[in-house]
Amino acid sequence: MKSLHYLLPFLVSALLTTAFADAVKDREGAVRKDKAEMQNDARWIYNDWQKGFAEAKRTGKPLLVVLRCVPCFSCMGLDASVLTSTGLMPLLDQFVCVRLINANAIELAKFQFDYDLSFSTLFFNADGTLYGRYGSWTHQKDKDEKTTVGYQRSLEAALAIHTAYPVNKAALVGKQGAPTPFATPIEIPLLAGKYKRDLDWEGKVVGSCVHCHQIGDAYRSYYRDQGKPLPSDLIYPMPMPETIGLTLEPDHIAKVQSVVPGSVAAKAGVQVGDQFSTLGGQLLLSIADFAWALHRAGESGPLNANVTRAGKAQSLVLNLPAGWRSKADISRRVGTWPMRAMAFGGMVLTDLTDEERLARSLSNDKLGLFIKSVGQYGKHAAAKNAGFRKDDVLVELNGKSIRATEGELLGQLLQTTKPGEKLKAIVLRGDQRVDLLLPMQ
């Protein structure tokens, strides 16, 4: 029983991850098949980024590192296209290409990207300077999406940066990773002692693999277990452009597809058709680069940008208001699941629409979070055990009833509470108001 109790949190995490990013049935078989097909590939260095850097230094080529969660269906179409598309091959031939299928031994100072994606690419100089990042939520949400137009443009942009290097090195400073408290993932307390640097090819290989999303999970646990507020960039990592009110076209580097009236972007004068060349002083080669620039932006204040509009360069200033990160939609991120256990006892909440509020006689400016589901196992069952039920509506928490989205409330709680606290809550259950206590974990 003791061993099962020890494994329960990881079993729950695996189940939740599978629920978010559907996986193949034979996960072990998928990983072993990938190794059999790729370890002797003429183009791809398999699971050895150090060898990739050495080869980049020897050849003078830029280094391309793909990080891929093989068993996940997400990004499966893009992954297959990158490996087989004849249209990409002339571009890929100009890089040293590395394929990583686990994150156990990556250097965290170098490899900073959107850990919630199952396919990411980082472009480096042999000296370790990062040229940029690529990652696609369009492909993440649709395993059958195979288009590589955006990827091709990122490859071309990375090659252009490499050609200009090191003259442009000063413009790349902001793209580099921030200092980290741990050198590798397996040193972070949540993962330490449970994983080794190398995969267990003689045993259960999938069980020995550190998935990218576990890095974010481990960082958040590190702060939470010490009773410290979670940094906002861990709660709302790599904010998408929609966070500031604009959508970028998925097949372009950073071309504006739409702008929300009254948003941060609209107030800055961003227009449909604008092509961002820099954000926060950083050169852009993908939408992921745009998200990284937002990730590194301040909690408030001006963020400079340069765009090309009708063939002419123009400078803009995006004024980020306090709390802007909390507008990020984190509902579909796999990293949100453990945070729901910390702050919501495993509940999944969704803000009632104005129409739904009217039907329940709730004001539009008051809290009204519908309990979409309640967890059943481990820490995710804490709300259930405290009396919360699916279809309840949370209307007050800790004496506050101001309207907030799930993501906004999640951030508030993870920055103001500590594990062990119990917050007074009021839910609507049919026509009744029910008083409950929500445990913080």
Image (spheres, rainbow, N blue to C red):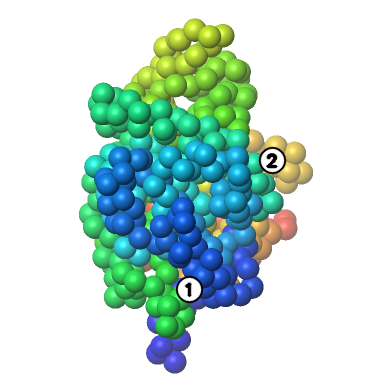
Which sits earlier in the primary sequence, circle 2 or circle 1? 1
Q: How many marks?
A: 2
Give the vertical position of 323 relative to 6 (above or below).
above
Q: Residue at x 62, y 60 (%)?
A: 73
Residue hosting label 2: 353
Verify CB contact (< 8 Å) between mark 2 and mark 1.
no
Q: Visible in this render: residue 440?
A: no
Give the vertical position of 316 relative to 286 (above or below).
above
Q: Quadrant of residue 293?
A: top left
Q: What is the crowding at mark 2: few (fewer than 14 residues within 10 Å), some, or many (at least 20)?
A: few
Q: Residue at x 33, y 25 (%)?
A: 164
Position of 224 with respect to 213 (left or right) is left
Q: In what quadrant of the picture does the N terminus appear?
A: bottom left
Front residue of 145 and 343 = 145
Q: Residue at x 60, y 17 (%)?
A: 273
Residue hosting label 1: 206
Front residue of 90 and 273 = 90
Q: Secondary structure at mark 1?
A: helix
Q: In what quadrant of the picture does the C terminus appear?
A: bottom left
**Residue type at tag 1:** Val
Position of 277 with respect to 427 (left or right) is left
Percent coordinates x, y for residue 201 in the rendering: 42, 78
Q: What is the crowding at mark 1: few (fewer than 14 residues within 10 Å), some, or many (at least 20)?
A: many
**Residue type at tag 2:** Thr
Percent coordinates x, y for residue 381 in the rendering: 53, 71
Q: Secondary structure at mark 2?
A: loop
Name of the residue lying farthest toward the bottom: 1
Q: Which mark is residue 242?
A: none
Front residue of 79 and 414 = 79
Percent coordinates x, y for residue 122 in the rendering: 40, 44
Q: Visible in this render: residue 360?
A: yes
Q: Residue at x 42, y 50 (%)?
A: 97
